[in-house]
Image (cartoon, rainbow, N blue to C red):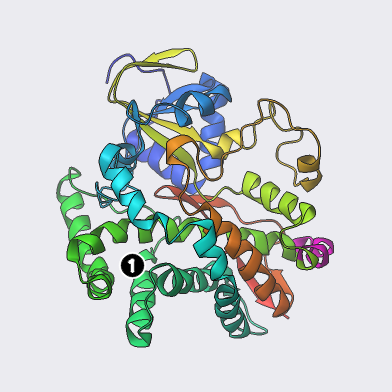
Amino acid sequence: MNGLPPGPRDGVLHQTVAFHRDPLAFLRAGQVEFGDVFTIRLLTARPVVVAAAPESVGELLEADPDSAHAGEARRSVLPFADPCSVFGGDGAAHRAAQAHVASALSPGAVDERREEMAAIAARHAEALPRGRPFPLLERVRDVTDEIFVRLVLGIDDEGLATRLVASIRHLLSTPGNPPVTLPGPGDGLVGRLGQKLFERRQAPALAALSEATGDRRRAEELMSLVMAAQEPPAIALTWLLDRLGRESDLTESFLAAPEGAEADSVVKETLRLQPPASAALRRLTAPRRVGGHELPAGVDVMVPSTLLHRDPRGFADPDDFRPGRWRETPAPDAPFFPFGGGARRCVGEHLAHAQIATVVPAFLAAGRIRPLAPEPELMVQRATVLVPKRGLLARVD
């Protein structure tokens, strides 16, 4: 595509590997060399314009959703996302899909289930291995999957719920380090093979969802939601538990008031440094000026939380964990968007906050969670999310 800003000159494969292995370092290097707006080319999405100026958040996330499609851009990275789903749809399709899940994810509906969330979390916390290392992310995923299946989808049948949770776990388990996105249609022979592999892995979860809903088409829409909605909250909860394991002095105050001002500051600072979603993606439907550059219609634009949450123009000492900054007056241009923004703000935001208030205390009450690595693990890229490189290895004493 002509007329795009300059960017790294390395080959597509080299850029893809570098981006997945260390997205923060890769994007920072591009910003240093080319400025706030530059173009990258990845195997799963090429080309992509990175818009890392603080004003880009308002320019794109708050834009008319008909002029900047989030679903279409996401499908370029995750071609399996259903165009009629909350995650992969645009326009009327997105609004219809959102209406299907809005009642189950409303604040009132979520708050009614908090006691059940806490009970599910406590049961899983009691089953954590003792005295040996384990990947914390896997254990937290089990909790969020069960909460979603039982409390959001409302599946009461014990056998069906257990089968669906297990099939979701299998579907989202990605081998390799870093875990990379499966190729999709349009990627040649490798893409066709990837499509077949994905369909095979998806089949048990899709069958269970079809049985639960009695509607194959509805199950296909929900599959995209399951894939997109389950990873970010599990990642966020895991990073938060890892942080509290490192900052033990914060644990007592967090347990005393999980939704108090001090706990809120810890949550925000954790999401700032380790945002589960690596970026907001938009595909322009008309030419648009972004960060001082005229971009053509059809281009995919990435607004990277990876970079912007650590932008020194918005945050002093941006790489330091300083929860107290959130009790001060923030810089007027401090970019912070862990749940997206505008018309595409995450529909599950309230559920995520409810899980923070119920799951985290349950795990903390089960014992001292001690991260094995002396420093927080490296964030690696997986599709549209940032995951800890080793799944956050920890032990419970």
Residue drawn at x 33%, y 67% as measured from the top left: 171
Highlighted magenta segment, given as a residue range? 246-254
Which image quarter: residue 226? bottom left
- Viewer-side residue, 222 vs 127: 222
Residue drawn at x 71%, y 36% as measured from the top left: 318
Pinpoint residue 51: horizontal percent, then vertical percent: 48, 26
Q: Kindly give the residue lying farthest to the right in the view shown.
A: 249
Pinpoint residue 334: horizontal percent, then vertical percent: 66, 30
Pinpoint residue 62: horizontal percent, then vertical percent: 48, 29
Q: Amino acid at mark 1?
A: Leu
Category of crowding for the residue at label 1, using alpha-carbon neighbours closer than 10 angstroms: few (below 14), some (14–19), many (at least 20): some
On the question of residue 61 being in view, the answer is: yes
Which image quarter: residue 316? top right
Rendered-image quadrant of the N terminus: top left
The dominant secondary structure in magenta is helix
Secondary structure found at label 1:
helix
Residue drawn at x 78%, y 45% as measured from the top left: 322
Pinpoint residue 33: horizontal percent, then vertical percent: 54, 21
Side of 292 where 74 appears, left or right: left
For label 1, the residue is 171
Task: Please say if 332 is above or below 182.
Answer: above
On the question of residue 86 being in view, the answer is: no
